[in-house]
Amino acid sequence: MDRTYRISEEMKKEVSNIIQNELKDPRLPQMVSVMSANVTKDLRYAKVYISVFGSEEEKKNALSALKSAAGYIRREISHRMQLRYTPEMQFDLDNSIEHGAYITKLINDTMKEKKN
């Protein structure tokens, strides 16, 4: 397996653990999931995709909370993972679940119209 892929998967697991168990920011809703993490080949940067179940306002609040906690998360990652460099993290929303639900709804609506 590719080394950056393994590091990305480990990063995803650790960031998820930190968000669920250690961050106490009131802007973070209960339903925040880390969908994936992509680490660059030189291990300098990591893009972490999160999914937030809730309104657009909750999503924006969760994103700003994670951006403000990025330094803390990075420090915790450096303690937990044995890497030469701890990647600088950038958080982004992953809307794939909402997109999938929208596509499913469109397909179902089309099927209903065909039956009628």
Image (cartoon, rainbow, N blue to C red):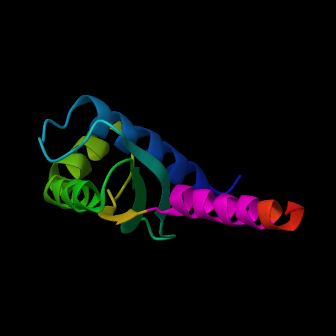
Q: In this view, does 13 lie above or below 74?
A: above
Question: Which part of the image, by quadrant, shows the C terminus?
Answer: bottom right
- Please name the predominant secondary structure of the magenta segment in the image: helix
The location of residue 101, given as percent across then percent down, is: 60, 56
Would residue 7 be found to the left or right of residue 77 on screen? Answer: right
99 drawn magenta: yes
Within the image, what quadrant is residue 114 found in? bottom right
Residue at the spot x=41%, y=65% of the render?
Answer: 47
**Considering depth in this image, is 53 or 107 the residue closer to the camera?**
107
Q: Give the range drawn in magenta.
A: 94-110
Residue at the spot x=19%, y=37% of the render?
Answer: 23
Does residue 4 appear in this view? no
The location of residue 48, given as percent across then percent down, is: 40, 59
Q: In this view, does 26 lie above or below 47?
A: above
The location of residue 103, given as percent across then percent down, is: 66, 65
Which residue is farthest top? 21
Which residue is farthest right? 115
The location of residue 86, given as percent across then percent down, is: 32, 56
93 drawn magenta: no
Would residue 1 be found to the left or right of residue 67 on screen? Answer: right
